Image (cartoon, rainbow, N blue to C red):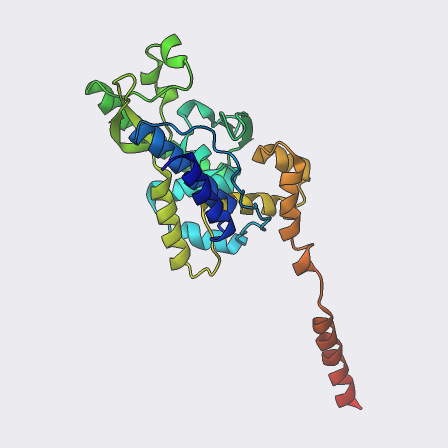
């Protein structure tokens, strides 16, 4: 099968299966990988595909009480990782890709490097996470020292820094805040690195915590970032500040959180509730008469 069959399959996903745009994009990426890396026959340009429409959906937002219930049911590193999106507004991968040098305990800031759109930004480090993060980094430092004695202790550097700073990949400042348990071998350089904690492990633990908390929402780790933004707006922070903390390029992206505030649909009294309230007020008056 070639380009024509791939076009037909992707179009059928959108027209007949009515999948989401992200599902169609994932299928395309998987096929490109299959033909290029596995079959050794890269596909030419994929043209004429009917694209699935990207629907506008409101984000899933947890209340403060629901966030507390979920975090209470997470343990160890998973609890700390999940606290970062809600405490600082990071995406899950942005939190997992933090390096030691990105956390400034003195200024209570977290620096996000190469975020979405390849943009850096700074977000607040919650006071309540300072001590847990310090204790966590002490354990990570001990693990790093053991790795160095074994001839390991390397973390992959971004871009061309590995050529410019030859020994920096062993420096403490460049190590992952949330490292994985095992090492892997880089195919290009043949060097054994320690990767950051994989997002799937955190996502599984978070899903189990949501179920254990008895929350009936389809919440994910990203819901904590949505909750961070919504709760800031509810507290009176202006939308431009929230936009900067989230790293949105356009304020229109941040505007979606105004639709889930209590000043929106849930802040309007339904005529039905107004009718019931008036009848309750009238009932005591009738009884007195």
Q: In the depicted view, which residue is nearer to us: 246 or 75?
A: 246
In this rendering, position of residue 255 left or right of residue 112: right
Q: In the depicted view, which residue is nearer to us: 68 or 25?
A: 25
| Residue 17 visible in image | yes
Residue found 25% across the figure and 28% down from its top: 183
Residue 14, image x, y percentages: 50, 48
Residue found 35% across the figure and 48% down from its top: 204
Q: In the depicted view, which residue is nearer to us: 284 or 144?
A: 144
**Quadrant of the rendered image containing residue 9:** top left
Residue found 45% across the figure and 43% down from its top: 8
Q: Quadrant of the N terminus?
A: top left
How many numbered discs?
Answer: 0
| Residue 178 visible in image | no
In this rendering, position of residue 149 left or right of residue 124: left
Q: Residue furthest left?
A: 150
Q: Quadrant of the C terminus?
A: bottom right
Residue 20, image x, y percentages: 50, 48
Residue 3, image x, y percentages: 42, 34
Q: Residue furthest right?
A: 289
């Amino acid at each position: 099968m070639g380009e024509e069959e791939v076009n037909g399959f992707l179009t059928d996903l959108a027209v007949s299966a009515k999948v989401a745009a992200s599902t169609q994009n994932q299928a395309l990426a998987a096929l490109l990988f299959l033909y290029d890396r596995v079959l050794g026959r890269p596909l030419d340009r994929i043209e004429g595909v009917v694209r699935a429409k990207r629907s506008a959906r409101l984000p899933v937002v947890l209340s403060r009480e629901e966030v507390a219930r979920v975090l209470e049911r997470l343990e160890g590193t998973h609890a700390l990782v999940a606290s970062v999106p809600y405490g600082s507004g990071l995406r899950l991968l942005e939190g997992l890709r933090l390096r030691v040098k990105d956390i400034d305990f003195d200024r209570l800031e977290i620096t996000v490097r190469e975020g979405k759109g390849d943009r850096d930004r700074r977000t607040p480090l919650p006071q309540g996470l300072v001590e847990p993060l310090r204790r966590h980094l002490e354990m990570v430092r001990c693990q790093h020292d053991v790795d160095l004695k074994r001839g390991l202790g390397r973390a992959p550097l971004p871009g061309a820094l590995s050529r410019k700073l030859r020994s920096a990949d062993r420096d403490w400042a460049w190590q992952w805040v949330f490292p994985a348990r095992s090492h892997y071998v880089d195919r290009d350089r043949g060097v054994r690195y320690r990767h950051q904690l994989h997002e799937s492990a955190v996502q599984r633990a978070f899903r189990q915590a949501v179920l254990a908390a008895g929350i009936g929402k389809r919440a994910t780790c990203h819901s904590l970032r949505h909750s961070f933004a919504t709760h800031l707006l509810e507290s009176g922070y202006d939308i431009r500040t929230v936009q900067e903390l989230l790293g949105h390029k356009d304020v229109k992206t941040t505007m979606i959180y105004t639709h889930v505030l209590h000043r929106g649909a849930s802040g309007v009294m339904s005529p039905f509730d107004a009718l019931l309230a008036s009848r309750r007020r009238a009932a005591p008056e009738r009884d007195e008469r």
